[in-house]
Image (cartoon, coloured by chain):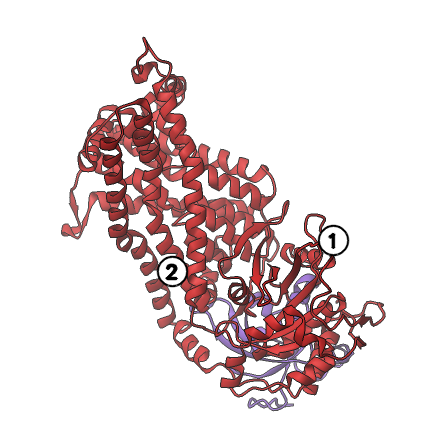
Amino acid sequence: MDSANRAAIGASEPSPRTLAELATGERCILERLDLPEGLARRLMELGFLPGHEIIPGRRAPGGGPRVFQVDGSEVALREETAARLYVRLHPESDVAVTS
Amino acid sequence: MSDCHGASPRAGLLPNPSILPPRPANDRPIIVAIVGPPNAGKSTLFNRLTGLRQKVANFPGVTVEHRMGKAKLKDNHEVFLVDLPGVYSLHPRAEDEQVTHDVLKGERGDFPKPDAVILILDATNLGRHLVLAAPILDLGLPTLVLLNMADDLEQRGGKVDIAALSSDLNTPVALISASKGIGIERIQQFLMGTAARLNAPPARIELPVLQDVPKCRQWAAKLGAQASYRAPAPPLWTRRLDAVFLHPVAGPLVFAAVVVAVFQSIFSWAKPLMDSLQGVLLNFGHWLTTVLPDSPWRSLLVDGILSGVGSVVVFLPQILLLFLFIGILEDSGYLARAALIADRTMAKFGLQGKSFIPLLSAYACAVPAVMATRVIENKRDRIATIMIAPLMTCSARLPVYTLIIAAFIPNIPLAGGFFSLPAATMLSLYILGFAAAIITARVLKSTILQSRGSSFILEMPPYRWPTLQSLSLRLLDRAKIFLKRAGTVILLVAVLLWVLAHLPLENGKTPPLEHSLAGMVGKGIEPAIKPLGFNWKIGIGLITSLAAREVIVGTLGTIYGIEGDELQQSKGLQAAVRQDLSTAGAVALLIFFAFAMQCFSTLAVVKRETGGWRWPAFQFGYMLALAYSGSWIAFHITRYFLG
């Protein structure tokens, strides 16, 4: 599986990024979900599937959960959940990855 | 992860293309289930198809609600429609998903297996929503696939080839707009089985492994591509509105304005409506008194039933106004944003943003609030929310607070006349209830209702205009429920109290209250409530208020035997209460009402929602203990300061 390979060669990147670390509008591709099965499945049903694009959006005022654009809809997640979703930057992302 | 179970790909046998099987000979009504993901427009479609011919019901034994309704077809036949809980898949995990799953599979003994399925999906998000088509088609039932929000799709430049999708799925597909009523006649045609018969003969279609979410999503993407699906542009207005509603500064301001508006609607805007309703009821009572001959029956009707039930019915405008507000907030999509904004604060007390919605409604009434906790998936979060909802100051406490404050709290201006002592007392009672609620939540969530990392996942629906039909159906529903309660529980208490206050007859005459059955009961509990500064008359009020808080006002009115018009009665009641209660006792009574669980309807709904008597019993005991100790402390402190 693609995500498994990625995890294995993860050393080529400085450190695996999580969805929680990204800036607003920074397009990324989901690699894997490090969450209990039930929660992971719910997120996948909402479009958080490995290989899918995610765009971080607005944060709730005062630093609450954050809205993510994913698979045609917008879903709010808490920071702690977003921190368990590992991503790589979108190849066409404006923010270039230096390597 | 659950991706790779060894199950082989299933091939779904394609259903009979006619949406409905031939009418059964034994004339069993035909049942069609409406299924779809949350926010796909299921309820709008259901309302559109059934109108007023619907009712809300609960599946026995579980907390999940469903709505049944009748749709009249043009050929004068009727089909029963059942609106099942919104699901993303048929993988049963949450309780509502389990119900949808069991009903569709025919695994619920108490509910017949549907004869056909209407699957409603959001056309503006077809890629993800089509995933649900796989498990639904796998059921092998005749299925009609509806792609809703056709108007939105077109407006935002999306498109889809219905014919191609229909042939790929091998089942009828229609593009509709449930809110605008576009394409509804197509559903009629399908239900009558006319259009469907033109379809191709049944054939197999390949379905992905249902447990494998990524595979199902790929399958849906392929179907979308084959149907030349073009996703619409992002909803521009939703983005624009979110820029304001979720703005770091403007967002909280709008949020605060919304909360204030809701409170304003409960307290001031509803008042003229309530006053006129009260006037109508009073005039009706006077009219009855003049028309009917003087007899015990007239007394029962006017002093017992009309004053008892009437004192509750006057709250109808207030409650409906609150539900109108909540309905607008929910249907427009703002409530999801409110939950998002509230999440951080609620998390501090161990709850989550979704608890905000029920707690807001609890200011009107705990009963709908408890039902509204269904949006919370985490069971422990949900029970914690149910446990604290009745501590919020519901509208039934208002008449009690108003009476006691008017009778005992002197009208001393505070803060340079900006505020007054009575208003400050009222506000303190609201704050007290809220504080007790959040502290209780904190305690519950860190002891018996601990949950590891309760998560908050909430889909943000695009903003939409609420439809008049959906709002009015909601209000009608609420009015029916409320009036039913007034006509049953409260009517019963009123009659019972009247009888108890008039028996046993002494020399063929009504006895003095002290010697009546009600008096004896009051005397019986007096030793228990004396430490709080209450005498036996207040005791009778406390007992009757177990049915519903506001009943105590009517009860005190009855037991003081006060007559005359409303103004005098209110003044007279205040004077009478002052004879029986010291100021310290009055403060204790306020605290008692702030904390005690005096509402049978709430207990009943908590029992239903938690599936047993354990939680309501705990809640009753906890709140009673809180009320008793709270008012004991308040009594002694006030007495100490007032000498």
Label 1 and label 2 in one chain: yes
Residue at position x 54%, y 58% in the image: B375
Give percent across and percent down for residue B490.
41, 36
Residue at position x 51%, y 50% in the image: B371
Residue at position x 49%, y 58% in the image: B52
Which quadrant holds the C terminus of chain B?
top left
The picture quadrant where one finds residue A69 is bottom right
The picture quadrant where one finds residue B60 is top right
Mark 1 lies on residue: B107
Give percent across and percent down for residue B455.
58, 61
Residue at position x 38%, y 46% in the image: B394
Give percent across and percent down for residue B310.
32, 39
Q: Which mark is residue B325?
A: 2
Q: Chain of mark 1?
A: B
Mark positioned earlier in the residue sequence (1 or 2): 1
SS type, badge 1: loop
Q: Is residue B598 visible to us here?
A: no
Q: Relative to the observer, which residue lies in front, B580 or A57?
A: B580
Up/down of B417 relative to A83, above or below: above
Disc 1 crowd rating (10 Å Cα; few below 14, some 14-19, many 20+) is few
